């Protein structure tokens, strides 16, 4: 049911209904959850939550903006305390138009002048509007509404301004005649005598609403028996919040520890619940691209790493400790950081020593007589259903997560990360996968499409453009061809011990475009004890 219709039905029903004050999205939502069928967006509290006075210091569009959050956070009708209508008939009709656009069910306007003053501040000195002029606001508002069920409540301030029942009746009659959907009769007395006298005289000409802030001690049954349509609890959410704000601030100031208030405040997850955070998580599942989630990583970790000596006597290199964790854990974290959850590790030497959780394993039992290419072939055969990008890397190569993001970006089917700093690492006197590229690294190449032309462990220095990090990304569409190529090569007797750079060179020789992403540093190949020391400060 439309909120306007809900409100109109509540207004016109013979039951006494209650409207709870709300002043922002979260208080509105809490009011709805408590079971209230409608809310009062009160001027006093809306302005107070902005930290200003109830004197139209907050502009009407600022009020409107907050109302939009309140309406979005709820599904029950909201009655706006529209003060005096923020001007004359013209302002009221524009207000009505904007309220309808923002799903606000009804507005209440009071017969005073803009800028208004709260009724409880020197009410008796407040000037009432001319009856005819106020009626023009009502008529213009009613003419402006597009939804027949939108309600305009008119608030009679005669008692507040020190006039008697006769003036209140005269005004209520005129407003009713002008098209008002209900009367809000306000009183600043501590007893309900004024509002009861009005209701008795007015009878059932139209629904009557009250705001018992001052005569709060009156039993609710008195209102019910008198036949009021609605009672507004007009400022109690903010007043309650202020107590909590003040107690919390004072306690924290005094004790300088959160322990002092932790059991008096809701857990953070209650905030998430009120914000509907779980809905966003579901939506993310539905809408966000799942590149990382569907991607797969294969980590080749079959070799012992004998250059590390005793350190790999009882475990393979991938399990050597670096900064308190096995090398492989660092690699898995980098993949996880890029959203890649599906990780297969090819084990060989002391396979059962690689036992990290939540990754899958493929064993190359021929590891002693075969090379990386055969290990990769086994991993590809073990997973016939790779749903996205495939990343391949070595079990002894640490790298920063952002290199994976860089590899995922280009549109080519094959992308490799190549370190420009090859001379420095070459000087360490270890084997390195050198590559030649279509263009050497320079400051300009970042927007050039550099391709790999060859890869080998020994290469004429003049031909070397960088060192391959061992990281390659293969696109999903290229996977069938890649699988076939790997399988065909691995089946060749002379390729049983082939390394991955042989595969790279073979792909390049076949005319595949292998896009090079140049990087400098941010990875580490753990070949020696010296590398292990360097890894201790890799972060
Ligand atoms: C409000 O809640 O802003 C009201 C009611 O208008 S009163 O504060 O009693 O005037
Ligand atoms: Mg008000």
Image (cartoon, rainbow, N blue to C red):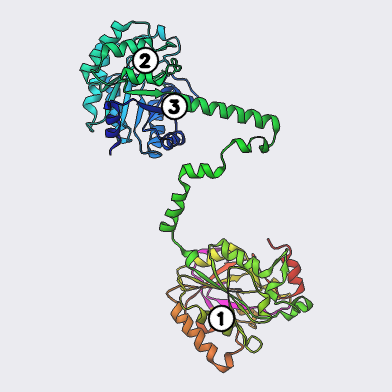
Do the CB atoms of the residues marked 2 and 3 lie less than 8 Å apart? Answer: no
Location of residue 532 in the rendering, given as x and y in whole percent from the top left corner? 74, 70
Identify which residue, 325 or 510, lies in the foreground. 325
Identify which residue, 146 or 419, lies in the foreground. 146
Residue 376 is labelled as 1
Q: Seen in the image, is 383 located left or right of residue 86? A: right
Q: Is residue 435 magenta?
A: yes
Tell me how far mark 3 sits from mark 1, CA to CA: 65 Å
Location of residue 528 in the rendering, given as x and y in whole percent from the top left corner? 74, 75
Picture residue at 37% right of the left edge, 15% below the top: 186
State which tag comes first along the sequence, 2 or 3. Answer: 3
Numbered disc 2: secondary structure: loop
Quarter of the image with the N terminus in it:
top left
State which tag comes first along the sequence, 3 or 1. Answer: 3
Q: Identify residue for label 2.
A: 186
73 shown above or below 202: below
Location of residue 233 in the rendering, given as x and y in whole percent from the top left corner? 42, 24
Location of residue 160 in the rendering, given as x and y in whole percent from the top left corner? 38, 10
Tell me how far mark 2 sits from mark 3, CA to CA: 19 Å
**Comparing labels 3 and 1, the label whose residue is closer to the camera:** 3
Magenta stretch in the rendered image:
429-452
Q: Seen in the image, is 301 located left or right of residue 125? A: right
State which tag comes first along the sequence, 2 or 1. Answer: 2
Residue 205 is labelled as none
Q: Seen in the image, is 170 located left or right of residue 460? A: left
Q: Quadrant of residue 498?
A: bottom right
448 shown above or below 222: below
Q: Is mark 3 within 8 Å of ligand 1?
A: yes
Q: In which quadrant of this rendering is ligand 1 seen? A: top left
Residue 282 visible, this angle: yes
């Amino acid at each position: 049911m439309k909120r306007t219709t809900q409100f109109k039905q509540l207004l016109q029903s013979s039951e006494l209904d209650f409207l709870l004050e709300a002043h922002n999205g979260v208080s509105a939502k809490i009011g709805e959850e408590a079971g209230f069928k409608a809310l009062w967006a009160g001027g006093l509290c809306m302005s107070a939550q902005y930290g200003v006075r109830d004197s139209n210091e907050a502009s009407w569009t600022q009020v409107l903006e907050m109302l939009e959050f309140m309406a979005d956070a709820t599904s029950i009708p909201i009655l706006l305390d529209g003060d005096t209508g923020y001007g004359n008939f013209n302002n009221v009709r524009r207000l009505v138009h904007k309220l309808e656009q923002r799903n606000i069910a009804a507005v209440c306007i009071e017969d005073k002048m803009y800028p208004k003053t709260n009724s409880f501040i020197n009410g008796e000195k407040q000037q009432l509007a001319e009856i005819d002029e106020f009626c023009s606001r009502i008529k213009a508002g009613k003419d402006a509404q597009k939804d027949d069920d939108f309600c305009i409540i008119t608030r009679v301030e005669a008692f507040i301004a020190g006039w008697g029942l006769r003036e209140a009746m005269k005004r209520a009659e005129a407003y009713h005649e002008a098209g008002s959907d209900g009367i809000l009769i306000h009183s600043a007395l501590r007893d309900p005598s004024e509002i009861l006298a009005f209701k008795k005289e007015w009878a059932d000409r139209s629904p009557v609403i009250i705001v018992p802030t001052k005569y709060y001690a009156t039993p609710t049954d008195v209102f019910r028996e008198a036949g009021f349509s609605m009672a507004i609890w007009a400022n109690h959410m903010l007043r309650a919040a202020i107590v909590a704000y003040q107690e919390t601030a004072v306690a924290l100031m005094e004790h300088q520890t959160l322990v002092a208030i932790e059991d008096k405040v809701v857990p953070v997850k209650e905030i998430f619940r009120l914000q509907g955070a779980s809905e966003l998580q579901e939506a993310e599942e539905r809408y966000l691209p799942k590149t990382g989630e569907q991607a797969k990583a294969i980590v080749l970790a079959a070799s012992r790493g004998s250059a590390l000596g005793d350190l790999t006597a009882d475990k393979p290199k991938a399990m050597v400790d670096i900064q308190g964790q096995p090398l492989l854990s660092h690699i898995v974290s980098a993949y996880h950081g890029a959203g890649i959850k599906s990780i297969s590790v090819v084990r060989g030497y002391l396979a059962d020593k690689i036992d990290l959780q939540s990754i899958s394993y493929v064993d190359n039992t021929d590891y002693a007589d075969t090379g990386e290419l055969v290990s990769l072939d086994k991993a590809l055969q073990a997973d016939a259903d790779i749903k996205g990008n495939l990343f391949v890397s070595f079990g002894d190569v640490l790298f920063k997560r952002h290199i994976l993001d860089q590899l995922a970006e280009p549109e080519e089917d094959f992308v490799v990360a190549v370190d420009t700093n090859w001379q420095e690492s070459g000087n360490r006197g270890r084997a390195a996968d050198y590559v030649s590229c279509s263009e050497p690294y320079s400051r300009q190449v970042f927007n050039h499409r550099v391709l790999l032309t060859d890869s080998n462990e020994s290469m004429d220095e003049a031909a070397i453009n960088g060192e391959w990090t061992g990281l390659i990304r293969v696109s999903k569409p290229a996977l069938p061809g890649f699988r076939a190529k790997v399988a065909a090569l691995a089946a060749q007797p002379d390729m049983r011990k082939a390394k991955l750079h042989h595969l790279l060179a073979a792909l390049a020789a076949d005319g595949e475009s292998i896009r090079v992403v140049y990087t400098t540093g941010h990875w580490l190949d753990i070949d020696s004890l010296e590398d292990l020391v360097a890894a201790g400060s890799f972060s």
